[in-house]
C-alpha cells in the first residue's frame, strides 16, 4: 500500500513560495505520501517547475505534467507533449503497485464547453482575454484536442485491463465541473471554452479500469463525483488571493467587510509581513483542501 498526493495549480512563483515548499514537503512525508504528482501550473517558467519537482523528488518520488502556465514558456513544439525529463509523465504510466498505475496527460481544450462556439470567434477571444495567447503551438485548439484524444485512446489501450489506472490531467474532462453563470455574470461563461474538452471524458468512459481521475485548472474546488465507473477529483491549490486562508486573514483582521478575490491582492499587499506570517501558519490547512490524496 502507498499514498499518492496529486497537487494541481501550485503556482509556486505567483504564490511566492520559499519556506512553504519545505513545510509542504515535510507535511507530505509525515502523511507517509509515497508518490507526489504535480498536475500542471506548478509555475510560469519551465525552469522553476523543474526546480520544484526536483526539490520534492529529493525526499519523495515525484512526477509531473504541464499546465497551460508552463506551456507559455515552451518554444520547441515537441516539448509540449514529449518533453525530455525523467519526471515528465505525459501519455506514459508510472507503476505504483503491481496492479495500479499512474497515467499522466497535460490535456487541452476545444471550446466544447460553450454550446455552438464558433471556432474563429473563440480563437479571437482567446487572443484578447486569455493567458494562453502567450502559448505558441501548432494546429487549432480543436485539432490539437482531437489529436490528443486519439493518442489518449491509443495509449490507454496499451494498458492491460487488469491494471487500475489513476489518471492525472490539467484540463477539465467533464462538463459537470464547468460552472455556468447566469444573468449579469453570463459573459464569464465564454471563458469555459478554454477549460477543457468533453471528448477527453468520453474517451475515459470507454475504459472501465480508469478508476480515478484528478485534474485542476479551474481554480475552483469541487466535491468528488462518480461519473460512470470513475471517481473525478478537482481540488486545485490556486492563487493566494483565492485561498480560504487569505479570506480569513482579511476578514478576521477586519481589512474588508466582505471577501472579494479581485480586491484581495491589493489588500494583502498593504500588510506583506503580517500576511506572510499568516500564510506560513495556515498553508498546510490550505493544502489539505487544495490537493487530492489517494491510497493505492
Ligand atoms: Fe492554474
Ligand atoms: Fe491552468
Image: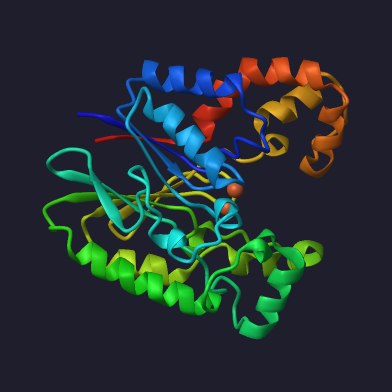
| Image position, residue 20 (x, y; %) | 58, 22
Q: Left or right: where does residue 107 sit relative to residue 180? A: left
Q: Is residue 96 above or below residue 194?
A: above
Residue at 66% over, 39% down:
239
Q: Is residue 150 above or below residue 37?
A: below
Residue at 12% over, 41% down:
98
Residue at 48% over, 66% down:
77
Q: Left or right: where does residue 255 sit relative to residue 155? A: right
Q: Left or right: where does residue 229 sit relative to residue 185? A: left
Judge by depth and name the residue closer to the eye, 116 or 110: 110
Quick check: can you spot residue 278? yes
Quadrant the C terminus occupies = top left
Instruction: Determine the image quadrant of residue 94.
Output: top left
| Image position, residue 76 (x, y; %) | 50, 63
| Image position, residue 1 (x, y; %) | 19, 29
Quick check: can you spot residue 219? no
Amino acid at each position: 500500500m502507498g499514498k499518492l498526493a496529486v497537487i494541481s495549480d501550485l503556482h509556486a512563483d505567483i504564490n511566492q513560495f520559499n519556506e512553504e515548499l519545505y513545510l509542504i514537503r515535510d507535511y507530505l512525508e509525515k502523511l507517509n505520501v509515497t508518490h507526489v504528482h504535480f498536475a500542471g501550473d506548478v509555475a510560469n517558467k519551465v525552469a522553476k517547475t523543474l526546480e520544484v519537482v526536483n526539490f520534492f523528488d529529493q525526499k519523495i518520488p515525484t512526477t509531473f505534467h504541464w499546465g497551460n502556465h508552463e506551456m507559455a514558456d515552451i518554444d520547441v513544439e515537441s516539448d509540449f507533449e514529449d518533453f525530455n525529463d525523467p519526471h515528465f509523465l505525459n501519455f506514459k504510466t508510472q507503476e505504483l503497485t503491481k496492479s495500479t498505475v499512474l497515467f499522466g496527460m497535460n490535456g487541452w481544450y476545444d471550446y466544447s464547453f460553450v454550446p455552438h462556439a464558433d471556432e474563429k470567434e473563440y480563437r479571437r477571444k482567446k487572443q484578447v482575454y486569455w493567458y494562453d495567447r502567450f502559448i505558441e503551438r501548432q494546429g487549432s485548439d480543436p485539432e490539437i484536442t482531437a489529436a490528443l484524444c486519439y493518442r489518449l485512446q491509443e495509449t490507454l489501450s496499451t494498458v492491460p485491463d487488469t491494471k487500475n489506472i489513476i489518471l492525472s490531467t490539467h484540463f477539465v474532462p467533464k462538463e459537470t465541473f464547468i460552472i455556468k453563470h447566469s444573468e449579469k455574470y453570463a459573459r464569464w461563461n465564454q471563458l469555459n471554452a478554454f477549460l477543457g474538452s468533453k471528448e477527453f471524458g468520453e474517451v475515459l468512459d470507454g475504459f472501465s479500469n480508469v478508476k480515478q481521475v484528478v485534474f485542476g485548472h479551474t481554480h475552483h474546488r469541487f466535491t468528488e463525483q462518480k461519473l460512470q465507473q470513475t471517481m473525478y477529483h478537482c481540488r486545485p491549490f490556486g492563487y493566494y488571493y483565492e485561498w480560504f486562508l487569505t479570506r480569513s486573514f482579511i476578514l478576521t483582521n477586519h481589512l474588508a467587510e466582505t471577501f472579494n478575490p479581485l480586491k484581495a491582492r491589493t489588500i494583502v499587499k498593504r500588510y506583506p509581513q503580517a500576511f506572510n506570517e499568516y500564510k506560513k501558519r495556515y498553508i498546510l490547512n490550505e493544502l489539505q483542501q487544495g490537493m487530492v490524496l489517494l491510497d493505492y
